[in-house]
Image: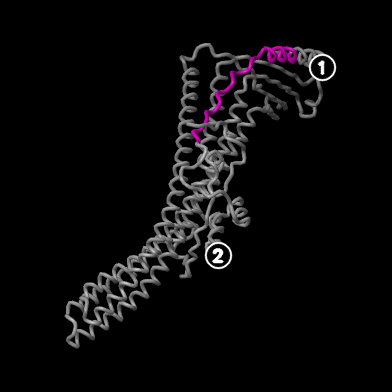
Amino acid sequence: MGEGGDGGRLDKAAASYALALAILLAACTPLPAEEPAPAAPVSTSWKSAALPGWTSTADHQAWQEGRWWQLFGDATLDGLMPGVDIGNQNLAQALANVAQAEALLRQAQAQRLPTLGAQLGTQRSGEPARGTATLGLSASWAPDLWGSLEAAVRAQGANVQASRAQLAAARLAAQGSLAQAYFALREADAEADLLTDIIAAYERAATITGNRYRAGIAAHTDLLQAQATLESARASRVALRASRARYEHAIALLLGRPPAQFSLAPAPWTMAVPEVPAVLPSELLLRRPDVAAAERAVAAANARIGVARAAWFPSLNLNAGLGGAAASLSALASAPALTWSLGAALAQTLFDGGARSAALDQALATHQAATAGWRQTALTAFGQVEDQLTATAALAEQQAHTRAAAEAAAGAEQRTMNSYQAGVSAYSAVITAQAAALNARRSVLQLQLQRQQAVVALVQALGGGWVAPWGQPPGVGNP
């Protein structure tokens, strides 16, 4: 450290410190290269059948822009979806987490810059009282000789990217849940309409059976069976109304609104089942927000290895000061009243009981854990895509068979009723035929809902059109 008031001495001292610092920096050796992230277990194609590509330009554009729900062509659903960004509290929490991560990144970046300080004071003491004015300016800087601060910035930058991917995942989850609840509500409306028609038919059947009973043609058990069938259908309609109310409440919560302040009027069900082509497995790593977030966790852990390694090297701190004291503030402005100082300190930990070694081991283990988590997240994503590709194909085939069964059951129901009225069949056969026809028709509607929900699940499994903005994953390879 040196100090004084002579300008020439200041220039010589500054030059000496600059030369010494240049020699020290030249002697520095960089840290060992950080370990690259391992390859992800990726297959070249899907096991289940997948569509080769988009057949509609408008649908492809909607997918690319993240407006996947427009593929279903439901205007009411289109109007509900923007409310997720406005009122969903899980999304608001994820957005706050992004802001927090960005603030931490700015803090990490600020560590690479010098710190400046200033102090100005005045004091009166003695008898007679005399005034004293003081001025102090200080600067300090710790050069990032070994890349520790740079590694910390990279780690926090990866955390920011991970938080943004988690925000996208939260948005996609809320949108998918809204679509699932909306389609379930519309299916409940369709089933309620079906049951209303069925109940009307059962009422007519009960009336006919009652007339036959009063005429002495039918047994009392026939009338009781007709009434039991009618009341059972009415009970099913009440249960559907309760289910619809629960779906409506779920939609309100997803939009961030109290259920008491939200209602959705019954409307025709848009039963479209869009076809969503599956991207290649290798592309899924950048299109699934949860997979991208897990990969960024690997990058952050990788950067923290550099921070842990840098702790083994000495640290350099540079400081400078300018200050003085005088009888008045105006006198401080004169150069003879000021003093300066320059300093440099090189510090090295010689013994820490193995703390640095343990910290490095922890960083390496954290990287291994993050890598395993990323691989498992990727495998789960691949499995979910395969599941939904299988489900969409199987449900379409299943619904076709069920629709044919419903048509046959409806014909059998009518023929059985005609036979009963002709006195050929017992009413128990009518009850059996009615139950089979009703179950088949309800199954067709339920399978239609399952097909739409399977497409929504496939959309979520494929990332909903989201793409990570930070480029390719660090490694892609076969298992």
Q: Estimate the x, y position of residue 156 in percent, counting from the top left.
A: 57, 33
Residue 28 sits inside the magenta stretch? yes
The residue closer to the viewer here, 227 or 468, is 227
Q: Label 1 belongs to which residue?
A: 7
Residue 281 drawn at (x, y percent): 52, 40
Q: Is mark 2 on a helix, strand or loop?
A: helix
Q: In which quarter of the image is the N terminus?
A: top right
- Give the answer, above or below, for where 113 lies relative to 468: above
Q: Disc 1 or 2, which lies upstream in sequence?
A: 1
- Residue type at mark 2 is Ala
266 shown above or below 319: below
x%, y% of residue 40? 51, 33
Residue 162 found in image quarter: top right
Q: Which residue is drawn at 72% across and 26% down?
A: 135
The residue under the point 75% across, 19% down is: 339
Give the Cα separation between the discs numbered 1 and 2: 78 Å
Q: Nearer the viewer, residue 383 or 19?
A: 383
Please provide the residue range marked out in magenta.
17-42
- In this orientation, does residue 383 appear? yes
Residue 75 image label: 2
